[in-house]
Image (cartoon, rainbow, N blue to C red):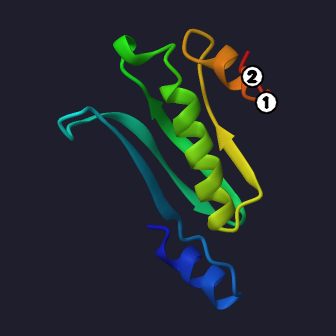
Amino acid sequence: MIAPLLAHNAAQGVDFTNSPFALALEDDGGTVVGGVLGYSRWGWLYLASVAVPAELRGQGWGRRLIEATETAAVQRGCRYIWLDTYSFQARPFYEKLGYQVFRTAA
């Protein structure tokens, strides 16, 4: 359906391709128990999901995941990180790490 639009954009030199991004949080046995999913494009890294199991929260795992994400973003040439969260999720956590709200839904 949007193939003609993507073809037109590509002909103009505009690439809308997302580069997938993932970091896994594994337990001692190597089982993935959480992590980060997203993509990068045009100097931005978008975090679609950040998950830390309830029993591991408050132990620094979320901070470590975000720090590793920030390092990977720089390595990808990204200057910015964007994420979504709900008020009942992790907004205070992200703000504690220096993230700022730029839009809220009514």
Which residue appears at 52% of the width and 79% of the height?
Answer: 4
Residue on which the image places disc 1: 98
Residue 95, given in percent of the width and then of the height, sits at 75, 22
Residue 47, given in percent of the width and then of the height, sits at 56, 43
Q: Amino acid at mark 2?
A: Glu
Residue on which the image places disc 2: 95
Seen as rendered, the residue at the extreme bottom is 11
Which residue appears at 39% of the width and 17% of the height?
Answer: 56
Q: Is residue 65 left or right of residue 52?
A: right
Residue 91, given in percent of the width and then of the height, sits at 66, 18
Q: Residues within 10 Å of mark 1 (few under 14, many from 20)?
A: few
* Numbered label attached to residue 7: none
Locate residue 15: give its quadrant. bottom right
Q: Amino acid at mark 1?
A: Gly
Check the image and report above or below for 42 versus 52. Answer: below
Q: Is residue 76 left or right of residue 55?
A: right
